[in-house]
Image (cartoon, rainbow, N blue to C red):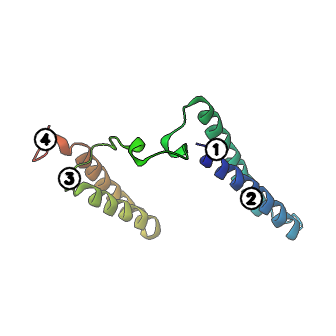
Amino acid sequence: MKPEYKLFGILAVFFFLVGTIYGLVTQWDEPVGFVGLYLAGGLGVMIAFYLAKTASKLPLRPEDDLDGEIEQQAGSYGSFAPYSWWPLWLALSGSIVFLGVAVGIWVAVLGAVFGVFALVGWVFEYYKGEHAH
C-alpha cells in the first residue's frame, strides 16, 4: 500500500500549499476557498495515515513487489450475473432521481420508487429464472 499512502500524502501537501497561496492572494478575505482547500488537505492526511497504518500490519501485496509476476495476483474476483439487465434499470432510475432534483421532487420520488424496484430485482435475480441457485 506504499504507493497509495504516498499519493494521498502528496495530495495533502498540495492542498495545504494551494490553500495557503489562495489565502495569501485573496488576503484571507474570502473564507470559503482556503478553508475548503485546508479541509481537503486534512482529508488527504487522514487517508494517508490510515493507509500507512494498515500497510504496516499487512504483508506485502503482489503489486507492491517490484519483482512480482502476474500469476501472483490471480484469483477469484467475484461472482457476476451474466446478461443482467438490472444494473441498467438501476442506473436509469438513478438518473431520474437526479433529474428530479432539477425538475421537481415528484420526479425524484418516482425515480426512487423505480430505483427500489430495480435494486430488489438486482439483489434477488439469482432466486428465480435462468440463473437461479
Task: Name the residue at 75% across, 63% down.
Answer: 33
| Residue found farthest to the top | 57
Classify 10 Å Cα crowding around label 3: few (below 14), some (14-19), many (20 and above).
few
Q: Amino acid at mark 4?
A: Ala
> Mark 2 highlights which residue?
14
> Mark 4 highlights which residue?
132
> Mark 1 highlights which residue?
47
* Secondary structure type for disc 1: helix
Of the image marks 3 and 2, the number of the one nearer the N terminus: 2
In the image, which disc is placed on residue 90? none
Of the image marks 4 and 1, the number of the one nearer the N terminus: 1
Callout 4–callout 1 Cβ contact below 8 Å: no
Of the image marks 4 and 3, the number of the one nearer the N terminus: 3
**Towards the viewer: 3 or 44:** 3
56 to 30, vertically: above or below? above
**Towards the viewer: 82 or 95:** 82
* Secondary structure type for disc 3: loop
- The picture places residue 116, in percent across and down from the top left corner, at 30, 50
Callout 3–callout 2 Cβ contact below 8 Å: no
